[in-house]
Image (spheres, helix red, strand yellow):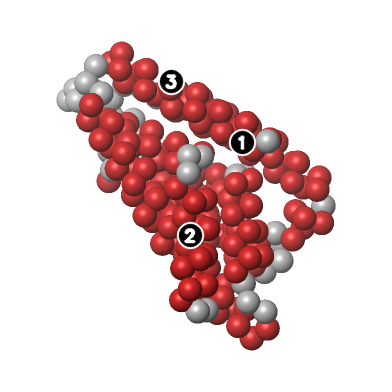
Amino acid sequence: MEIGFFLSMLGFLWVAAITPGPNNMLLTTSGANFGFVRSLLLMIGIMLGMQSIMLLVAFGVGSLILVYPLLHTILKVLGSLYLLWLAWKVATSAYETLEVGVAPPKPLRLYQGWLLQFLNPKAWLMGLGAVASFSLPGAAYNQSIAAIALGIFLVNLVAGVIWLGFGTVIGRLLHSRRSWYTFNISMGLLTAACVLLIWR
């Protein structure tokens, strides 16, 4: 893949990765509630999920969504329900105290970040768009898929670190129980609002 073509692909992927959406809302919330390091597994899960989606699209499974529109509708319904469940978990997150002997709450796990991608129509559209627009025909196909996978890895890594860092900074500013709950409820509502993006 030529460098200019690769950079064009990175631009496309960057816009998809950095804009607000379910992944970025969850990373921000997790960074604020649990800190940067404790949220890394969620970010890794999201990145692995994106790679899984892209490979499924590249090797034919994604085309089923185009051939059978009902599958896309089912994906939207399941994705919406999962997002609403995550939004509820975010909005009702417990206030983390520093009391000795109290077990701290747990951040979302790696598998939850990975699973979200399979129910996230934005992830499928990103994978479909990248493969359809930037894969090369013939013998160069596998090489172009490897380049797309690298591009997705890079943009998701940078975007994930930015959103996690943003959340971590916000978390340091939340010193009272009231501000903590206000933030979590706001992020829960924003995560729930991502459902509207799925259906537009």
The residue that disc 2 covers is: 11
Res. 115 visible in picture: yes
Q: Residue at x 64, y 38 (%)?
A: 198
Please state which of residues 91 and 3 is positioned toward the viewer in this rendering: 3
Q: Secondary structure at mark 1?
A: helix
Q: Is residue 110 visible?
A: no
Which residue is at a point 32% across and 31% down the rendered structure image? Answer: 33
| Mark 2–mark 1 CB contact (< 8 Å) | no
Most extreme residue toward the bottom, as rendered?
A: 139
Numbered disc 3: secondary structure: helix
In the rendered image, which residue does mark 3 sit on? 185
In the image, what residue type sits under mark 1? Leu
> Tag 2's secondary structure?
helix
Q: Nearer the viewer, residue 40 or 167?
A: 167
Q: Residue 197 got which mark? A: 1
> Rounded to the nearest whole Å, what is the CA distance between mark 2 and mark 1?
21 Å
How packed mark 2 is, by other alpha carbons closer than 10 Å (few <14, some 14-19, many 20 or more), is some
- Dot 3 crowding, Cα within 10 Å, few <14, some 14–19, many 20+: some
